[in-house]
Amino acid sequence: MLDGPAPVLEVSDLQTVFQMRDGAVHAVNGVSFAIAPGELLGVVGESGSGKSVTMMSLMRLLPSPPARIVGGEIRYQGRDVRRMSDAQMRELRGGEIGFVFQDPMTSLNPVFTVGYQLVEPLRVHLGLSKSAARARAAELLKLVGIPDAARRLDDYPHQFSGGMRQRVMIAMALSCDPKVLIADEPTTALDVTIQAQILEIVRDLRQKLGMGIIWITHDLGLVAGIADRVMVMYAGQVVEHGPVKAIFSDPQHPYTRALLATVPSVTGPRATRLRTIEGQPPILLQYPRACPFAPRCRHAFNRCRVENPTRIPVGEGHDVACWWDPATDEPRHV
Amino acid sequence: MSDAATPLPRAAEPLLRVEGLKMHFPIYKGVLRRRAGAVKAVDDITFSVAEGETLGLVGESGCGKSTAGRAILRLYEPTAGAIVLEGRDIAHLEGDALRTLRPKMQMIFQDPQASLNPRMTVGSIIAEPLDEHTRQSRAARRARVTELMDAVGLNRTFVNRYPHEFSGGQRQRIGIARALALNPKFIVCDEPIAALDVSIQAQVVNLLEDLQQQLGLTYLFISHDLSMVRHLATRVAVMYLGKLVEIAARETLYDRPAHPYTQALISAVPSPNPEIEAKRRRIVLKGDVPSPSNPPPGCAFSTRCPRVFDRCRIETPPLYDLGGGHRAACFLAEPAARAA
């Protein structure tokens, strides 16, 4: 990111460990990324690849113990997030960085009205008066496309449908004009036609509000449509990162390539048989010394089994953590 | 041969024929628990499934696709309609007559975690249908279990392990082995891959395809994943709010969808190609699916349809035949409307 605005959020070499009774699980292993204002970064990976844990741990949303950040640096607008006090952290969460969770049912409190839950952060973070906060809350609901917004403030979460609840969650995350919005699989629990509605809202809001968005998903198709940059994660590591076009037209990592090959499409030619990735993702009981994808990789050679690849630049803003070069089908000379 | 030029002979009788199937769940209200209405989960659907084919049943959550699958397998008592399996109406069978039919039709469930008893070993889970429906010796049963485990790609040394020791994909294989135990002809797959990761989904889908070829199975594949249905199904039926809105051969449905809902559904699936995504014209529907206990008058889709006109709000469109087995329930597909 040589050109463009300076990043708002910068994470380098983040390492998070879950200390369990019978050993440690290394969930995040040296993740680095940055997000600039107005940019949408798609984070792709299967369950257990560490994409949610990365975001949760940098926001200090994981219970500690067992979760613990053991290394790395997190900078928000130049400030060191790891050294912030709990009070400062509370201000950052919600105030500066908004979070939208996957399941809109469990992340709204069923015993309070939606209006109450929307007004609360506005009063705490922005110090608005009751009536001003209520007016702002109605404005937010309108922004995310909820009809008859002012009246619906007095409804309880169960009176909203799944798609509407997710809009409420987005409205809540947007309430204090965050600079960064982290959306953790916000449309996974929703139907495709509702997902399409939410995506339209996000495209629209991004232009209007100019915030940086981190969109976590396992749906590659979704990322192709909305992201500027894509980060592919596997076993708590970033295995490939680059501009959306490069990732889809010229994927470098065998995992990215395999993921793209396994997904059928509703257009274009239809494969007679789906390509698969054999085997299972690993559970990391120690910091990976070798490439964690090597046991499932059809291109793995000796070096992959003894040395964990670093992120090697392969193009404009495009890097890959792999020793194999798809262009020559031979090891990279690095 | 003189009839070499004629199209493929139509099978005399499809394996399964569903006619006017209705599944209504009553709603009771008040102190006296009077019947106040009904949730019309499945409301008058008609289709057939030929032997050896895969019919994809798609729709959004709450459209009644799972209820339809369960009613066909007679896990519910249908409110009305006929379910004809191999020429015999099974819609209102009871007791032993129904029980002897069960081995022919089986189900693979969505959540492999919830559909396997955590206190039973894999071996006993797979053998349970055999215990219930056959009188085989222990040795024969044991042999059949290992045979099934081989067929679905489970290591046979795991026979004494418990479900929690397996991953999601492997658990789904256990569910598949159990469904196959009694050599069924017809299997309802109710979102069998929805709970799995992308890389594991492909493994399970390939397994289902292999088994279909080897054993000549017929599937009703219920899913909300339109791209996976396109890969797997030979014909596709689309449901909306308890009604069948369109049914067609796979190519026809994806290339020339006739119903505005099908068009919107296909257009809502993101494509893993940024170039296509940037250019694509999307149909974004407004609003949510109405409640099936209080459906709108006329066409059920009229509240969200981008091409709605007055007639849709009054009359319910029938399933118009568009030729070649393509049927759609929309006034725009009416022969007169198409001619105009």
Image (tube, grey):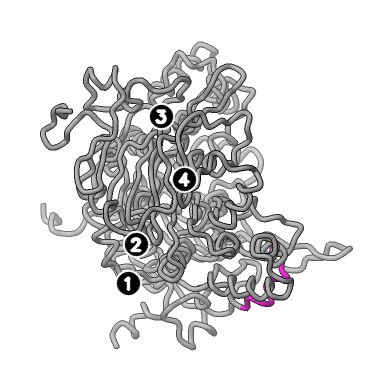
What amino acid type should be assigned to the residue bearing mark 3? Pro
Compute the Cα span from label 2 to label 3. 38 Å
Count of marks overlaid on the render? 4
Front one among A118 and A7: A7
Instruction: Establish if A2 lies above or below B214.
Output: below
| Figure check: A132 above or below B75 | below
The numbered disc on residue B231 is none
Distance CA(mark 2)–CA(mark 1)? 9 Å
Residue A152 in magenta stretch: yes
The residue beneath circle 4 is A75
Helix, strand or loop under label 3: loop
Please identify the quarter of the rendering in which residue B308 is found. bottom left
User: Horizontally, is B17 left or right of B135 in the view?
Assistant: left
Q: How crowded is mark 4: few (under 14 residues within 10 Å), some or many (20 or more)?
A: some
Foreground label between 2 and 4: 4
Name the disc covering residue B322, or none: 1
- Mark linked to residue B248: 2
Residue A269 at x, y = what percent? 21, 53
Identify the subunit bearing mark 3: A
Query: Which chain's residue wears label 2?
Result: B
Q: Do the residues labelled 2 and 1 touch (CB within 8 Å)?
A: yes
Do callouts 1 and 3 mark residues in contact (Cβ within 8 Å)?
no
Question: Disc 1 versus disc 3: distance between alpha carbons?
Answer: 47 Å
Q: Quadrant of the C terminus of chain A?
A: top left
Judge whether B319 appears above or below A334 on screen: below
Q: Give the range drawn in magenta.
A: A148-158
Q: In which quarter of the image is residue A284?
A: top left
Q: Which disc is residue A281 wearing?
A: 3
Q: What element carries label 4?
A: strand
Q: Nearer the viewer, residue B103 or A36?
A: A36
Within-10-Å neighbours for mark 2: few <14, some 14–19, many 20+: many
